[in-house]
């Protein structure tokens, strides 16, 4: 077997082993997804406004002002709760 083919075979085998190991190792994943959209022009209950403007003229309006949020699950240290390695992928 020529030297070039032997090197390619070794590199391909090493890549395959590393790919298989990476499938079964737990990873530090953080899953982010869209969270709820909160209407900040409304009241928080008990007639307490969520958003208050002071020092400027304000006018009544029928518009809505939504605050978008992001939900994140997991930590960089522990990963996502319930995550299992992909043993059947091998």
Image (cartoon, rainbow, N blue to C red):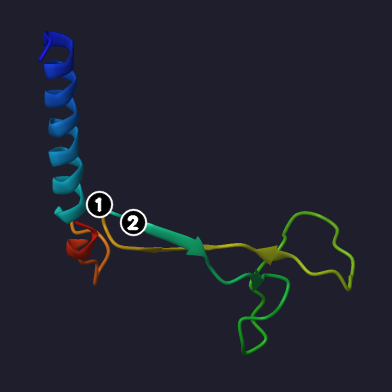
Image quadrant occupied by the N terminus: top left
Q: Residue at x 17, y 16 (%)?
A: 5
Q: Give the left or right position of residue 68, taking residue 1 as reference.
A: right
Q: Is residue 35 above or below residue 1?
A: below
Image quadrant occupied by the C terminus: bottom left
Q: Give the left or right position of residue 4, taking residue 54 as reference.
A: left
Q: Residue at x 62, y 90 (%)?
A: 46
Give the image quarter of residue 78: bottom left
Q: Pinpoint residue 59: horizontal percent, then vertical percent.
A: 89, 66
> Label 1: which residue?
76
Q: Is residue 39 visible?
A: yes
Nearest the camera: 15 or 63?
15
Q: Residue at x 23, y 52 (%)?
A: 28
Nearest the camera: 15 or 35?
15
Q: Pinpoint residue 8: horizontal percent, then vertical percent.
A: 19, 20
Q: Residue at x 67, y 70 (%)?
A: 40
Residue farthest along the top direction in this orientation: 3
Secondary structure at numbered mark 1: loop
Q: Give the left or right position of residue 57, taking residue 68 as reference.
A: right
Secondary structure at numbered mark 2: loop
Q: Is residue 26 visible?
A: no
Q: Is residue 17 above or below residue 25?
A: above
Give the image quarter of residue 63: bottom right
- Which one is earlier in the sequence, the residue at label 1 or at label 2? 2
Nearest the camera: 10 or 58?
10
> Label 2: which residue?
30
Tell me whether the residue at label 1 lies in contact with that at label 2, contact meaning CB atoms closer than 8 angstroms: yes
């Amino acid at each position: 077997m020529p030297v070039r083919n032997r090197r390619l075979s070794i590199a391909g085998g090493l890549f395959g082993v590393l790919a298989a190991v990476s499938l079964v190792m737990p990873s530090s994943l953080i899953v982010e997804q869209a969270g709820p959209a909160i209407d900040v022009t409304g009241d928080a209950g008990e007639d307490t406004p969520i958003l208050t403007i002071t020092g400027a003229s304000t006018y009544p309006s029928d518009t809505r002002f939504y605050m978008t949020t992001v939900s994140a699950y997991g930590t960089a240290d522990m990963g996502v709760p319930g995550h299992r390695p992909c043993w059947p992928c091998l």
